[in-house]
Amino acid sequence: MQPALLVINSGSSSVKFAAYEAADEAPLSRIAHGRIENPASPEAAFTQLFDWLAQQTGGRALLAVGHRVVHGGAQFQQPARVTPAVLAQLETLNPLAPLHQPHNLSAIRAVARLLPELPQVACFDTEFHASQPWVAQACALPRRLTEAGIKRYGFHGLSYEYIASALPAHLGAVAEGRVVVAHLGNGASLCAMRGRRSVASTMGFSTLDGLMMGTRCGSLDPGIVLHLIQQPGISVSALEKLLYEESGLLGVSGISGDMRTLEASAAPEARQAIELYAYRLNQQLGSMAAALGGLDALVFTAGIGENSAPMRQRVGSGAAWLGLELDAEANQAAQPGACCISKTGSRVAAWVIPTDEEGMIARHTQALLRGNAPAQRVKPPVA
Ligand code: ADP
């Protein structure tokens, strides 16, 4: 029996996981997956998970664990085998992604405590954007700050990397052209690709920038931050909470940060939140098209991109000036899976392609360990 690779995507309120059969040929086949909601602690979650996995996979040996880690900073532009030194370096990046990085790293630490012999690999959401030109990464701040790492990193890289790998099968030669991918989940961003490499992204130094999101504000005049921080009684952590957790769709609607809930609501505030979301998405699509000098294809992915026909319709209609003719019927009828939603003859192609961040992490983990990590028959700890 082939050993298994486990992929862990640990967030603030849930741990997503997927197990794959470690084989030489890609794509790796997924043998189990799921989500643990609101775990009491990472240790409790993983003790339960290892136990469950052992039952599900008939006691298969576990080869390694691959983790999604949101920030690799300037140091990590490739997946890395986790060592205490690597973990210490990654910890210094916690303030840059306070909503994600600490959770990603506590998952790594918890697995190391439970199964110290098991190889762990960190895969970064920033690494796909390392190919961006200097102008896309620089901030117009004093040079010493840019040199100290205050620059635009970009995120959702594992999702974009997966989509880039899937583009040729769907778009043919157009895949190598000017493509914008819209990753629209709870977090949301756009990535401009040429030759399937990132040339620009709407997320920048942090995961706050760019598009309006579920609970994050997206691009904001920095003068507003200066104004708010000078108000009596507001602390830095309260401001951080405001921008990361109380803004976006939730803040504007006052109802929910969840697109599905807002689409089902008749409240005018819900309509306005959706309208603002689409307006800003279209604005920033224009910015990505400008970075590319035009547009050949637009791809929608993640929860909203894959499932919300009304949002795709709004964005598609707003992109008519770029040469996109959306096929309203194909868009409405789109089923789970990849499908084309632009009219035949549209100068710009539009597609829905489901993302697979976990699959991408599994591929990286397998590639990094191939040949140098013997499978270990780890005994899951008793729950
Ligand atoms: P995460 O970024 O946490 O992985 P997802 O990619 O699952 O999140 O995206 C979550 C978002 O997708 C939520 O706003 C949710 O409402 C939205 N979504 C999921 N299904 C639908 C649907 N059928 N219609 C509209 N929005 C949807």
Image (tube, grey):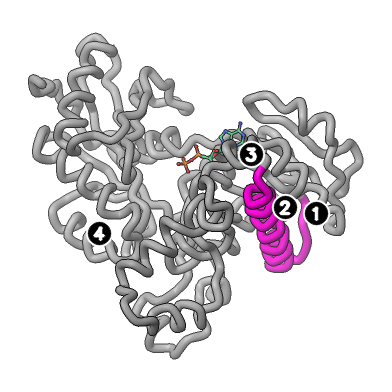
Q: Which quarter of the figure is the C terminus placed in?
A: top left
Q: Amino acid at mark 4?
A: Leu
Which-is-in-front pick, marks 1 and 4?
1
Name the main secondary structure of what is drawn in magenta.
helix
Provide the secondary structure element on which disc 2 rests.
Answer: loop
Q: Quadrant of residue 32?
A: top left
Give left or right: position of 133 versus 23: right
Which residue is outermost to the front?
267
Is disc 3 surrounded by few (<14), some (14 to 19) or many (20+) residues within 10 Å?
A: some
Q: Quadrant of residue 194?
A: bottom right
User: Are the two marked residues, 3 and 4, in contact with CB atoms closer than 8 angstroms?
Assistant: no
User: Are the two marked residues, 1 and 3, in contact with CB atoms closer than 8 angstroms?
Assistant: no
Residue 287: within the magenta? Answer: yes
For residue 75, above or below residue 103: below
Provide the secondary structure element on which disc 4 rests.
Answer: helix
Which residue in the protein does label 3 denote? 265
Earlier in the chain: of badge 1 and badge 3, it is: 3
